[in-house]
């Protein structure tokens, strides 16, 4: 029936997010506005798309009004410039402008993921890759994080290298290494690559599951308070800004089963302030001091996992069997601890990035160790950076117009969002 077809078209239009990308409002930033029916996880989806493109979220407003949700992001690229690449703008519009689940990248078809968790120590990554090389396993991609003595790692293997018999052998060899000398849990789980929707999110989940619940750490960067009159719990994050900070916070809240109803994000001179008004999935706020402390600690952990200080080593070289084993063994022999690793292959080339410290996390790396690594690996294929690249630069005097212009631009574009936040008492009148 014709009227039914028109009704279905209307429903599709109502349920499809409206994405507006504006380069005209602010002279130094691009505004990305997502207006949609409220759906669980929609905020994380939006932030994830921006994070995967290495975009800087300098300001943002988040607001839900009944069944509707609006996010306004004030973004630049990693160099602080507006978005001018048509392919990037088109990708954002296509990714955020649909409710359909993202398709599995073709590059991950036919792959199996080994999820590794265990007790971290100097040389552990090297030993893991040495075992895989000894078993003739070709590592297509890998991600690894270490934090507070724990390691989480995702290793992507081709399906032919990960049949049931070989996985059992891999597990038998790696499990003792991952457990170390302690009684802490550690092990190997093999899953299809299609089940790992996003590598960074999965690493957060693995680290969260392996957290030490008996230890208490100070959390100066995160506070959680109750606002009983409005039925919200208020989460405030204040810390130095860095790449993917917003993603790490929103990802953690989502995986802890909290919903973000409103929020404001602002950065200034390299410092970030994020405020979120949250409830449980059932609509209730956090009800106990113990739960507030747990949320604060989990968010602090998520922030710290990527807050790295040390040396960044980038290796680009033709791929070959045993490459990762040889490179990480060189790190181990020179007393370097791999705090994070990002490994990928494209065609016959390997692109590997390692973030290393001294033998203890946070310890300075001696120049002699770096020179030894250079000599062993080769100067032509190794790039060394003393610090992780900064996402934001300190504001210069001539940037005042940027701050004022950005505020004005956001006010005009997100007037509806800010009006909601003001009437709810979540922000002050300007």
Image (tube, rainbow, N blue to C red):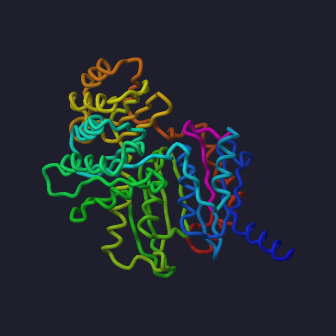
Q: Residue at x 69, y 68 (%)?
A: 15
Residue 202 image point, x, y percent: 41, 55
Up-down: is 57 above or below 228? above
Judging depth in this view, the residue of 378 and 20 nearest the camera is: 378
Q: Quadrant of the C terminus?
A: bottom right
Boundaries of the magenta span: 71-84
Q: Residue at x 58, y 67 (%)?
A: 428
Residue 232 image point, x, y percent: 48, 75
Q: How many marks?
A: 0
Q: Quadrant of the N terminus?
A: bottom right
Identify the image quadrant of residue 312.
top left
Q: Residue at x 40, y 34 (%)?
A: 353
Most distant residue in the right direction = 2
Judge from the rendering whether residue 54 lies leftward or rightward of residue 379; answer left or right: right
Queried whether the magenta region covers residue 357, the answer comes back as no
Q: Residue at x 83, y 72 (%)?
A: 6
Judging depth in this view, the residue of 41 and 410 nearest the camera is: 41
Up-down: is 113 above or below 274? above
Queried whether the magenta region covers residue 77, the answer comes back as yes
Identify the image quadrant of residue 66.
bottom right
Residue 287 image point, x, y percent: 38, 79
Judge from the rendering whether residue 8 lies leftward or rightward of residue 112; answer left or right: right
Identify the image quadrant of residue 355.
top left
Judge from the rendering whether residue 244 lies leftward or rightward of residue 365; answer left or right: right
Most distant residue in the left direction = 181
Most distant residue in the bottom direction = 229
Residue 45 image point, x, y percent: 56, 58
């Amino acid at each position: 029936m014709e009227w039914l077809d028109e009704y279905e078209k209307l429903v599709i239009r109502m349920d499809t997010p409206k994405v507006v990308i504006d380069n005209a409002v602010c002279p130094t930033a691009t505004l990305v506005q997502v207006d949609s029916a409220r759906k669980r996880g929609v905020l994380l989806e939006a932030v994830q798309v921006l994070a995967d493109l290495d975009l800087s979220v300098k300001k943002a407003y988040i607001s839900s009004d009944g069944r509707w949700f609006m996010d306004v992001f004030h973004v630049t690229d990693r160099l602080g410039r507006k978005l001018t690449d048509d392919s990037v703008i088109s990708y954002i519009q296509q990714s955020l402008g649909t409710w359909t689940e993202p398709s599995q990248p073709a590059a991950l078809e036919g792959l199996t993921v080994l999820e590794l968790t265990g007790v971290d120590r100097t040389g552990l990554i090297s030993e893991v890759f040495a075992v895989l090389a000894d078993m003739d396993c070709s590592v297509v991609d890998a991600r690894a994080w270490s934090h507070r003595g724990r390691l989480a790692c995702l290793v992507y293997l081709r399906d032919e290298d990960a049949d049931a018999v070989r996985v059992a052998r891999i597990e038998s060899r790696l499990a003792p290494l991952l457990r170390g000398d302690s009684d802490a849990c550690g092990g190997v789980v093999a899953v299809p690559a299609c089940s790992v929707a996003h590598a960074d999110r999965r690493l957060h989940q693995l680290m969260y599951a392996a957290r030490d619940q008996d230890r208490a750490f100070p959390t100066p960067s995160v506070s959680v308070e109750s606002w009983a009159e409005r039925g919200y719990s208020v989460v405030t994050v204040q810390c130095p800004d860095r790449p993917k900070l917003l993603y790490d916070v929103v990802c953690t809240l989502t995986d802890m089963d909290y919903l973000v109803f409103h929020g404001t994000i602002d950065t200034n001179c390299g410092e970030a302030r994020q405020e979120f008004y949250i409830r449980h999935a059932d609509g209730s706020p956090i009800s106990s001091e113990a739960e507030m402390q747990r949320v604060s600690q989990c968010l602090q952990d998520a922030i710290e996992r990527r807050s790295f200080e040390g040396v960044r080593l980038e290796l680009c070289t033709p791929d070959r069997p045993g490459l990762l084993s040889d490179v990480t063994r060189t790190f181990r022999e020179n007393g370097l601890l791999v705090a994070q690793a990002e490994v990928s292959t494209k065609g016959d080339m390997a692109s590997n990035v390692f973030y290393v410290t001294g033998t203890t996390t946070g310890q300075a790396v001696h120049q002699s160790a770096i020179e030894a690594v250079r000599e062993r690996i080769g100067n032509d294929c190794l790039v060394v950076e003393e610090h992780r690249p900064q996402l934001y630069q300190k504001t210069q005097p001539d940037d005042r117009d940027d701050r004022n212009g950005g505020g004005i631009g956001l006010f005009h574009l997100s007037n509806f969002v800010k009006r909601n936040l003001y009437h709810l008492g979540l922000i002050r009148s300007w």
